[in-house]
Structures are given as C-alpha cells and as structure tokens.
Image (cartoon, grey):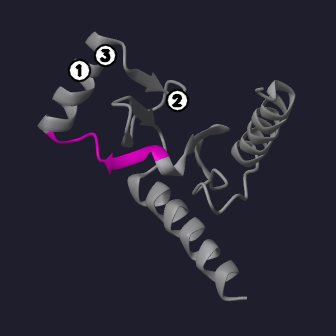
C-alpha cells in the first residue's frame, strides 16, 4: 500500500525549504546576492549588476544607438531636461540617459566594489 500522507509531507517540506532558500538574500548555495544600486542622478538608481557599459554620448555610434533605442522604446531618460553626459547600457538592452558625468558613475561603481572587497577581508 502506498503512503500518500508521508509522500505529501516530504513534498511540502521540500517546497518550504526551497522557498526559504530562494527568498533568503544571503544564501550562498544558490548564488544569491544582495543587489547593489548606483545613484545616476536626481534620486534615480540603477542596479550595478545590470550595467553592461557606460559611454559618453558624443560619439556617432552612441548617438545612433540612442536614436535606435528611442525608436524601439528602450530609452529611459533620467537627465531631467539637462544635457546628457552619460549613456548607460543595460543587459536588457535598455539605454539610460543621465546628466551625471561618465567618470562619476564609474567611480561610484568602483567605490561599491572596493567596499565589498573591504568587507570580505574583515
């Protein structure tokens, strides 16, 4: 005879443990991590892990990329009407226009990396 009750209990225990591990942000076994956000100006933040490239908007290829992204509806303009000084490209192919200098955003990214390294050494 099959023990359905015992089988049901094992399945419930498995799913409870699975959900607990997924929603635990410090879980090392699943490779989960705490998401880092970078301030890109005027109170706007972007996930540091999603950034693929940061470029200056002055070159013609970047202008073309922004123009094509506008046509496709993939542009997020957070410059608040100011001059665009940095173009951020994400892994989802969204293009973010920021009024903050490229170097400033890069420094904010590297500062977060340095803080992470310092925490690991303690």
- The image's mark for residue 78 is 2
Q: Earlier in the sequence, mark 2 or mark 1?
A: 1
Q: Where residue 67 is drawn, which disc sits there?
A: 1
Q: Are marks 1 and 3 in contact (CB under 8 Å)?
A: yes
Residue 58 forms part of the magenta stretch:
yes
Left or right: where does residue 22 sit relative to residue 102? right
Task: Count how many numbered circles sit on residues in the image.
Answer: 3
Residue at image coords 38%, 43%: 86
In this rendering, the label closer to the viewer, 2 or 3: 3
Q: Nearer the viewer, residue 81 or 49?
A: 49
57 w.r.t. 101: above or below: above
Relative to 81, residue 60 above or below = below
**Residue at 52%, 29% in the rendered image:** 78
The foreground one among 37 and 60 is 37
Which of the 4 quarters of the picture holds residue 29?
bottom right
Q: Position of residue 118 (x, y in %)?
A: 65, 82
Q: In the picture shown, does residue 55 fall above or below 26? A: above
Image point (66%, 88%), residue name: 121
Q: Position of residue 49 (x, y in %)?
A: 49, 50
- Look at the image and tell me in which quarter the N terminus lies: top right
**Front-most of residues 100 and 73:** 73
Q: Which residue lies under the disc numbered 3?
A: 70
Residue 85 falls in image quadrant = top left
Q: Residues within 10 Å of mark 1 (few under 14, many from 20)?
A: some
| Span highlighted in magenta in the image | 50-59
Between the C-alphas of marks 2 and 1, the distance is: 16 Å
Task: Find out whether residue 77 is within the magenta segment.
Answer: no
| Mark 3 Cα shell of 10 Å, populated few (<14), some (14-19), many (≥20) | some
Q: Quadrant of the C terminus?
A: bottom right
**Label located before the other in sequence (2 or 3):** 3
Q: Secondary structure at mark 3?
A: helix
């Amino acid at each position: 005879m099959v023990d359905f009750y015992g089988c049901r209990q094992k399945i419930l225990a498995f799913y409870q443990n699975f959900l607990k591990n997924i929603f635990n942000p410090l879980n090392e076994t699943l490779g989960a991590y705490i998401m880092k956000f970078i301030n890109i100006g005027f109170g706007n933040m972007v996930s540091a892990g999603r950034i693929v490239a940061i470029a200056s908007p002055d070159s013609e290829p970047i202008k073309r990329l922004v123009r094509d992204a506008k046509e496709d509806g993939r542009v997020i303009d957070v410059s608040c009407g100011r001059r665009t000084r940095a173009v951020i490209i994400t892994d989802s192919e969204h293009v973010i226009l920021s009024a903050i200098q490229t170097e400033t955003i890069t420094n904010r990214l590297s500062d977060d990396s340095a803080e992470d390294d310092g925490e690991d050494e303690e």
